[in-house]
Image (spheres, coloured by chain):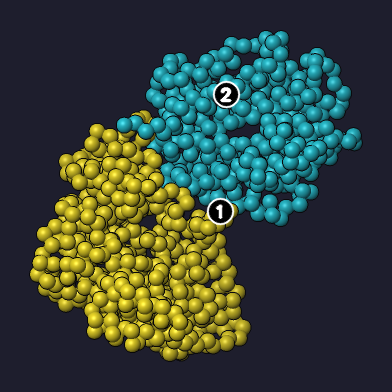
Amino acid sequence: MGLGICIIVVYFVLYQSHGFDVKFDEYDPGDFYDELFFSKGQPRSEAALLIERINSLSMEELQQRQQAAQNALFKLGVTFNVYSDNQGTERIFPFDIIPRILSIQEWQRLEQGLKQRIHALNLFLNDIYGDQKILKDGVIPTELINSASGFSKPCIGVKPPQGIWCHITGTDLVRDRDGQWYVLEDNMRCPSGVSYVLENRRVMKTTFPQVFGRMNILPVDDYASQLLETLLNLAPTGLPEPTVVVLTPGIYNSAYFEHSFLAQQMGVELVEGRDLVVSDGYLQMQTTKGLKRVDVIYRRIDDDFLDPLAFRPDSMLGIPGLMEVYRSGRLAIANAPGTGVADDKVIYAYVPQMIRYYLGEDQLLPNVPTYLCWEPEQQQHVLQNLDKLVVKAAGESGGYGMLVGPHATPAEREEFAGRIQANPRNYIAQPTLCLSRVPTLFDDCFEGCHVDLRPYILYGKDIYVNPGGLTRVALRRGSLVVNSSQGGGSKDTWIVAEGENEC
Amino acid sequence: MLSRVADSIYWLNRYVERAENIARFVDVNLNLLLDASVVMTQQWAPLVMTTGDLDLFKQRYGEPTAENVTHFLTFDQQYSNSILSCLRAARENARSIREIISSEMWEQVNTFYLMVKEASQTQPIAQLPSFFAEVKMASHLFAGVTDATMSHNEGWHFGRLGRLIERADKTARILDVKYYILLPAVNYVGTALDELQWIALLKSTSGYEMYRKRQRRISPTDIAKFLILDREFPRSIQFCLVQAEQSLHQISGTSPGTWENTAERTLGKLRAELDYIMIEEIIQKGLHEFLDHLQTELNHVGEQVSKTFFALEVIK
């Protein structure tokens, strides 16, 4: 699952025209929730120091720093690949030097909500591939599970180490016009983007060293150590030095940089399917000194391609026999195959029920209100309000199979209405949200650009949330899409604790 | 170490070394052109011959001139051994093993590639000498950064093996072509222009100054001896083979002087041959024949290294 995204829709966007060398004095957040400003000229308290610092710089200096940051990322090779383009296959993910800032209090609320959610989702996965109590108790209709595209029959009865299925999650959060946070997608399969979090931060420290000196910004650098611990935690017990590897589809994958980066930061091998073979009942890698056993795989390949014997027989990336080794307990896989069932958008709508069912708690971090088209009443509502809603195919992600009602033509809406009626199970609808904005540097001014937030969560011995996450920003003027292939970019995310540093 | 990774680090180093050597050839010829009053178009064909791709060149460009040979060897995207293509291949290899090499190595090879790529779009041929100097320096930087930032582990030895095999091969080729073209008979006494060309040959291996310290007078036989058999000059074939063999034994753990695989046996045999041969014997047999034999054997070594360590035969 790439960096693709989803509903980013507002009804209108306001633009101010700016003169030259105008700094934040002129910046007007307008009718949006702005992450750095309450209102024109009124920065939020956690952003005040940064705004002050930026106001003390000239536009030229800012532009130079912006350019230096971009150059640094390019030199580091922090790039993503564009499939269709063979010459310049790599692009830098555009980066904006104005960070998104959250207070630690707000962050702690998000963190609690995310931990609760991941905990419940893992209990759900363990249940759904095991006793299926939640179905037997009628909390989720059985046919919804059986018809979910991510429900993986080969995984039924599998018992992953410690009952954890989803070890690495990158949950997409958005904030609406009123400041309310929502979970947009859970991304339980192979969420990408964490390498940008780490590299963006590295670059930001050189861009605004004084600001880092004075503010109390939570560090993000321990992600790699936490990830390694999470993976080692899965190894079959009794091994003195378990071998962990990262499995990549190869250098042409759009997230290859990240695969390589994470392997390097953890000091483990980065392997491709062709390096691996099942031999003597174990997964082994081919080395210059013969075969070597592999105990834990952090795979960045979708379930379908993991093992041609268990899943897609035409997979060239996978390893025949891998699932058999996995089922026998001689290999751990992160994330476990089968987690995709929770990414079904219909199943997503049931997360509040899961939290209540498994944990006996109320959901801390709400879902975007979701209408399920397979329920006749809700379908009725959706069909009557197609011009106001965003309709999504349940099994798709990354903005595919989607109707943005307010932007669609009547013909498009009619076509979608037909699709919904033909296959109601496959569609959900949500209200259009107005995503919050962060000021972003353009040629001669700041403009508010829409953002989302993807924090990264690891589930090993405990649940760990990396403080911050990837803030994706719709950089094209007026655009509402933060997708990297459509003019989207990223920003550093600062979680700021109280108090000024002494220096 | 993964076989695929060993393969990539070996080729990463070969490609960087190849790009550097091409820069050397072309640069020296361009310099020569500035010195000589005579029209020297015939000097460009040997340059293409060095690469072994003269036929391909003629098909694409026709008669060799300074401009088209320089373009072919430097920026031709379709030609797989141009400096630009070598750097692209080096970088692709580096990209597939970024987690193995140091960040500094990656940054150096990435910067190197971007520099060459940019030059290919903007650099007029007249400004190339400074470009070639940059290429050589970037290659040295890469080797230096590699030595200074990467653990001298198995991967490092594979890299050194690749670099030295490539270097030995290139030294053999350049010597072969010059000798063959410039000097049909060994005892031929050249003109002043010939002496310039021999100096150019030495310079293209960065060997001019070191040669002077060793032999003083410019003599074809002594130059051949220096470039093939010298034990101290880091671009001589013998020097490369000795060091390459050390790396091979570090990789396998076999004691020097013994062998356990065909890569060690092939390389050891070739190194031993050079240990005991004298330049007079080489000249007597025919220098071209000898260099031809050397290149064949070096290819053979490369094949055996690949077969022994990299070949990904699926073992069931």
List x then y, in percent, for residue A146. 21, 63
Task: Please report the residue visible at 51 percent of the width from the left and 26 percent of the height from the top.
Answer: B303
Residue B244's spot in the image, x, y percent? 52, 26
Which mark is drawn over residue A125? none
Q: Decide which of A431, A272 is in the foreground and name it.
A: A431
Q: Which residue is drawn at 28% across and 61% down?
A: A150
Subunit ID for the residue under disc 1 = A
Q: What element carries label 2?
A: helix
Displayed quadrant of residue A166: bottom left
Q: Name the residue under label 1.
A: A86
SS of the residue under disc 1:
loop
Q: What residue type is labelled 1?
A: Asn
Q: Does residue B266 appear left or right of residue A380 in this picture?
A: right
Residue at the spot 21% in from the left edge and 42% down from the top edge: A330
Q: Is residue A222 left or right of residue B118?
A: left
For the image shown, how many numbered marks are present on the structure? 2
CB under 8 Å between discs 1 and 2? no
| Quadrant the N terminus of chain A occupies | bottom left
Colour of chain A in the image = yellow
Which quadrant of the view contains residue A270?
Answer: top left
